[in-house]
Each structure stands twice: as C-alpha cells, then as structure tokens.
Amino acid sequence: MSVRQRAASRPDSPPTMQSPTLSSRRHRMTMSHESPRRRRLVVAGQLPPPMGGQNVMIAHSIDVFRRDGRLVVDHLEFGFTRSWAGARSASVAKVVELARVIGRLVRLRLTGPIDCLLYPVGGPHRNPVIRDLALLPFCYLTSKNVVLHFHAGGIANALPTFGSGLRALVRFVYSRAEGAVSLTQFGRQDPESLGI
C-alpha cells in the first residue's frame, strides 16, 4: 500500500483506488528507522463478518503490514456491527462494546508503546460519528500518532447538517489526528473539511 504526503501529491492526479493518499500536517512522522526497535502499529477496526468494504480493507491492511517485517502489528478489535441489520443504529450492546474496545486499547498500551494507530473513521452518519468522538480521545492518549483512515466517505457533506455544537466538537476531536488516509483524490475533501 503506497501513501503520499500531501505536499507531494499533484492536484491534477487522477483518482485511484490503488494509491491511497496520506494527508499530514507534519513533514516527518515518528515512524523513522532511527532506533533498532521495530515500530509498533495498531490497526483498529472490525474484521468480517459482516462482509463489507471497510471490514475487508481492514483485514487486508493487517495482512499487508504484517508481511512487511519492519513493523510490529497488532489489531484493536471492534465488534460494533454483528450484522447489517444493526448497522448505524444505537443500542446498549454497542455501548458495552465501546467500553470493551477502550479496555482492549488500554491492555495493548500496557504491553508497550504504540507508535502509530490506524483508526477507521465510522462515516458520515450521526451514530458512528458519536462512536468516534468517544473513542478517539483514548486513542490520542495511548498512541504517539493517530492516523485516520477514511473509507466510508461523505463526512464533508454531512458536517453542515450537524448542529453547531456537534460540528465544532467533531472538528476539534478529528483534527487532533496526525494525518489521514483517503482512497481517492476526491476523498481528500473529508479530512480537509475536518482540518487535517
């Protein structure tokens, strides 16, 4: 999987699914090879089932990163959606799962430093956004760098429909991330609308 710095990407580049773009406010990430210790990457998100584009992409990303050999790769498991019938809806079970995910993250941190956490943004709907608002502060506290992965696009268009308070909170929390990965040039509007 190739990524490109924001400054290095050309505005006339055609959209591509094979070359995700990385938007970053800093020119140098702390994933350098200055230390003999292998850097630790935590990939957050839900694996199939259910089968869906984001779930499949997360599984593929973990496989690719683990085969690289230069990184120690761990998975922070999400289990919010057990079937498509429960997608985008709120439930007591999802609140319980939120607490479990935070517990898993704390346990991962206790086993050693997390150099980078790749976090899958939930998408433009209110419930996934609230989930992200609850989880991301813990990600920032436990990880040296958090990179947001925008697979379910559309938050740039949804943001104006949120109330002013929620809109300000969303921009504040998401913009704390070190950078963002989007699958197409067009998809860059999502992280850019959040100040990344």
Image (spheres, rainbow, N blue to C red):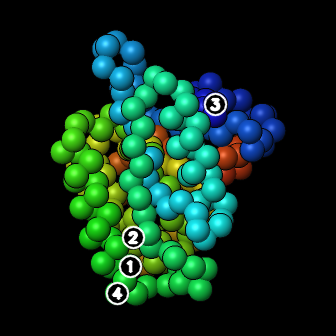
Which percent across, then down, holds residue 193? 53, 55
Which percent across, then down, holds residue 159? 53, 68
Which residue is identified by label 2? Answer: 131
Task: Categorize mark 1 by other alpha carbons within 10 Å: few (<14), some (14-19), many (20+).
Answer: some
Q: Is residue 159 left or right of residue 54?
A: left
Q: Quadrant of residue 79?
A: bottom left
Q: Element type at marker 3?
A: loop
Residue 125 or residue 40, whichever sits in front: 40
Q: In the drawing, what numbered circle is on residue 94?
A: 1
Q: Are marks 4 and 3 in contact (CB under 8 Å)?
A: no
Q: Nearer the viewer, mark 2 or mark 4?
A: 4
Q: Residue furthest left?
A: 110
Task: Categorize mark 2 by other alpha carbons within 10 Å: few (<14), some (14-19), many (20+).
Answer: some
The structure residue drawn at horizontal position 40% and vertical position 25%, both measured from the top left corner, is: 31
The structure residue drawn at horizontal position 56% and vertical position 52%, both measured from the top left corner, is: 58
Identify which amino acid the numbered label 1 is placed on.
Lys
Q: In the drawing, what numbered circle is on residue 92?
A: 4
Q: Nearer the viewer, mark 2 or mark 1?
A: 1
Above/below status of 68 relative to 172: above
Q: Quadrant of the N terminus?
A: top right
Which percent across, then down, holds residue 78? 42, 63
Q: Are marks 4 and 1 in contact (CB under 8 Å)?
A: yes
Q: In the drawing, what numbered circle is on residue 2?
A: 3
Identify which amino acid the numbered label 3 is placed on.
Ser
Q: Element type at marker 4?
A: helix
**C-alpha gap between disc 4 and disc 3:** 39 Å
Above/below status of 118 relative to 49: above
Q: Are marks 2 and 1 in contact (CB under 8 Å)?
A: yes
Residue 50 or residue 91, whichever sits in front: 50
Q: Nearer the viewer, mark 1 or mark 3?
A: 1
Task: Categorize mark 4 by other alpha carbons within 10 Å: few (<14), some (14-19), many (20+).
Answer: few
**C-alpha gap between disc 3 and disc 2:** 28 Å
